[in-house]
Image (spheres, grey):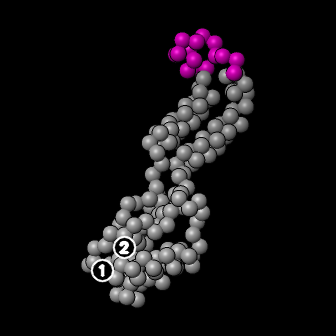
Amino acid sequence: MKKMLETAFPGIDVVLTNHPPTFPKRLLSKVVPVVQIGAVGLVVAGEHIFPMLGFMTPPPWYYSLRANKFGTIASTWLLGNALQSFLQSTGAFEVYLNNELVSDLFILSATLNAFLILNKVFSKLKEGRFPGEIELRDIVGKKLGNSGIGGLLA
């Protein structure tokens, strides 16, 4: 879509950025790698870690984890990465014109010396779907045409 918009509207800069997840999701996504490394460390060196924590003998569940080290580490790593990816994904896709608020989106800014305040053109979060290429081109064309710089870009 980036290439299509840049071709259809010469003089438009298309910038892709990620919409930040909410604060609790961001915080949890930072905790996941710590838990992963802790789990790997526990499986590899648990017989030394538990005595340092005040347990003379490790709990019974530790022995079942240690019996299948590779499976435990691989599962921890794969599930942790999937969880981290889920926490960082917002599903946002929004289209803005002229450096309006940044989201997981395209920012379309005219490279002219004109300053325009235009509203959001399209929001996947609001519409519940992605726009088609033709639909997006038509929406952006209408917005640029209504702004008075559409003729200057063509």
Viewer-nearest residue: 148 or 67: 148
Q: Residue at x 39, y 75 (%)?
A: 13
Tell me which amino acid carries mark 2: Ser
Residue 67 visible in this rendered orientation of the protein: yes
Q: Position of residue 34 (x, y in %)?
A: 51, 35
Residue 48 lies in the magenta stretch: yes
Q: Position of residue 54 (x, y in %)?
A: 54, 11
The magenta stretch spans which residues?
Answer: 47-61
- Looking at the rendered structure, the secondary structure element under dot 1 is loop
- Looking at the rendered structure, the secondary structure element under dot 2 is strand
Q: On the image, numbered disc 1 is attached to which residue?
A: 112
Q: Position of residue 151 (x, y in %)?
A: 37, 88
In the image, residue 1 above or below residue 152? above
Tell me which amino acid carries mark 1: Leu
Q: Residue at x 73, y 31 (%)?
A: 68
Q: On the image, numbered disc 2 is attached to which residue?
A: 109
In the image, residue 78 above or below residue 128? above
Horizontal placement of 64 versus 109: left or right?
right
Q: Position of residue 65 (x, y in %)?
A: 69, 27
**Label 2 Cα neighbours within 10 Å, binned few <14 / some 14-19 / many ≥20:** some
**Label 1 Cα neighbours within 10 Å, binned few <14 / some 14-19 / many ≥20:** few
How many numbered badges does the structure rendering display? Answer: 2
